[in-house]
Image (tube, rainbow, N blue to C red):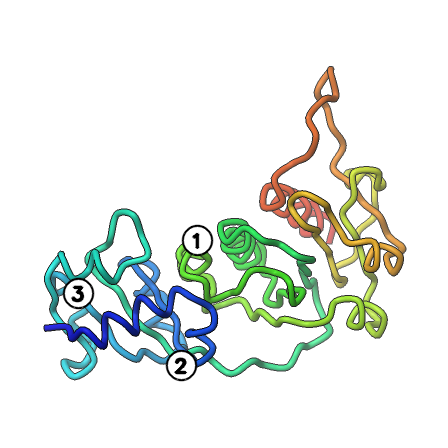
Amino acid sequence: MVSKNQIKLITGLQQKKYRNEHQLFLAEGVKVIQELLQSNIVLDHLFETESVFETVPTAQKTLIKEADMKRMSALSTPSSCLAVFHIPAPKPIVSEGLIVALDDIRDPGNLGTIIRLCDWFGVTQLLCSKETVDLYNPKVIQATMGSVSRVQVNYVDLATFISETTLPVFGTFMDGKNIYKESLPSEGILIFGNEANGISPALEQKIKNRIAIPRFGNLQQTESLNVATATAIFLSEFRRNS
């Protein structure tokens, strides 16, 4: 049985201010929850409409009705399970290897997909500007499909960080140098900008290496690539070169 207070707390966690207040976040679906349970992220409580996770202690899980799951879920089609996890304490940034940085990414699906791509290409650190969508937004967690447990995400003042780093910095621009003709290092910071406006002017002036994915279409009329799609191409090229 789930109480009204528990439902109120869980629906509240769909908002950033309540996630910050309680230091908790939501995860839904067997795949995502399974990945998180196998990580160092600490489970607070699990709610199921059918018994799925036998290894979770009885004191930490509750069997509930589908109607209650619909009231609690952030999904249009609720899963059979929903879990509440503790937000882990941030870890210090290690300035080595290939690091992805996001300047004002607003779409939760894009952030979640980029986290999955970082996981796929072995990028263990992701830096986000303060304006970027919250990592623990339920839609972001859903889109990561569990990769959030393997990629370290830090929210920083990107302009300050870029000014102080000793790593080479690469910015992705429409008018940059052809990525397929560049010699790319194994270490560096790769920056992606806002979906509509690209990298902000304040950050752009600090970037010396401007790179781009060339258009091959005959008409050359496609305005831009989706930022997550572009991330996949750039990361593939960096890994292929290095």
Q: Between 144 and 22, which is closer to the camera in this rendering?
A: 22
**Type of residue at label 2?**
His
Q: Where's residue 73, x and y in %?
A: 27, 59
- Label 3 – label 1 distance at C-alpha: 20 Å
Mark 3, secondary structure of its residue? strand
Residue 197 image-quadrant placement? top right
Q: CA distance from mark 2 to mark 1?
A: 22 Å
Say left or right for 112 vs 198. Answer: left
Decide which of tag 2 and tag 1 comes sooner along the chain.
2
**What's the residue type where badge 3 is placed?**
Glu
Amino acid of disc 1: Ala
Q: Mark on residue 224?
A: none
- Looking at the image, which is closer to me, 81 or 98? 81
Q: Earlier in the sequence, mark 3 or mark 1?
A: 3
**Badge 2 element:** helix
Q: Secondary structure at mark 1?
A: helix
Q: Which residue is mark 3?
A: 48
Q: Which residue is mark 1?
A: 143
How far apart, in angstroms, are the residues tagged by discs 3 and 2?
22 Å
Residue at 31%, 60% (x, y): give it.
Answer: 28
